[in-house]
Amino acid sequence: MIDETMLEAEEKMEKAVEVAKEHLAGIRTGRVNPGLFSKVTVDYYGALTPLQQLASFQTPEARVMLITPFDKGAMSDIEKALRESDLGANPSNDGNVIRITMPELTAERRKEYIKLAQSQGEEAKVSVRHVRRHAKDQLEKLVKDGEVGEDEGTRAEKDLDVMTKKFTDRIDELLKHKEAELLEV
């Protein structure tokens, strides 16, 4: 029973770290990457479809992204979705590819992005701590119901604390890396 609880907690904590990675990848740094477009959805023949499923991405320069649609008929829909997104991008279309040149990040904008990254990192840590609290309650219930001994329960709680620290440290590391990326000029 303890092993099941610990395994479930570890899986959920791992998921929280993955979500944090995705959120942090969506925050723009000085260099353009396809992760910035992960939240852009295109009205493709009446269905909202993620841009990643409709096109390929190339980065010829640090601030330029070339988006090549798999279906040339979707070009105007993709361009419209990019214009309406919160990326602040102004796409241009040459008939084959959509070129996006992202504006240079100002110091003020970088600070805003750092605050955003920190708040998303904190959300991920809260999620990890919530998983810990839930697992700890389950362990205490097992001890109370007499399914496991107190020593085993205490040992499992210590292991749970170590696991929680490991995952919060990973989130801190992701955050530190993202902040360094944002401050890089």
Image (spheres, rainbow, N blue to C red):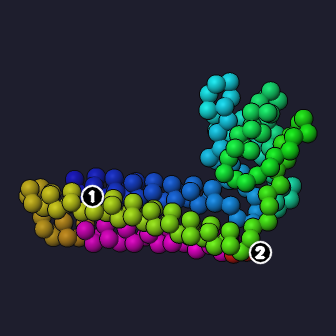
The quadrant where residue 154 appears: bottom left
Seen at 71% across and 74% down, the residue is 107
Report the side of 14 relative to 160 (left or right): right
Secondary structure beneath label 1? helix
In this view of the protein, which residue sits in the foreground, 161 or 99? 99
Q: Earlier in the sequence, mark 1 or mark 2?
A: 1
In this view of the protein, which residue sits in the foreground, 133 or 29? 29
x and y percent of residue 127 in the render?
Answer: 39, 60
Read off the residue under disc 2: 185
Rounded to the nearest angstrom, the CA distance separating label 1 from label 2 is 42 Å
Report the side of 176 relative to 16 (left or right): right
What amino acid type should be assigned to the residue bearing mark 2? Val
x and y percent of residue 30 in the render?
Answer: 75, 66
Q: Residue furthest top?
A: 45
Other-residue count near label 2 (Cα within 10 Å), few / some / many at <14 / 14–19 / ≥20: few
Q: Are marks 1 and 2 in contact (CB under 8 Å)?
A: no
The quadrant where residue 25 appears: bottom right
Secondary structure beneath label 2? loop
Read off the residue under disc 1: 134
Mark identifier at residue 42: none
Seen at 90% across and 35% down, the residue is 95
Looking at the picture, does residue 123 appear above or below residue 176?
above
x and y percent of residue 155 in the render?
Answer: 23, 70
What amino acid type should be assigned to the residue bearing mark 1? His
Looking at the picture, does residue 74 appear above or below residue 23?
above
Q: Quick check: can you spot residue 58? A: no
Report if residue 156 lies within the magenta region: no
Seen at 45% across and 62% down, the residue is 124
Report the side of 62 relative to 25 (left or right): right
x and y percent of residue 15 in the render?
Answer: 45, 54
Point out the stretch of residues depicted in magenta: 157-182
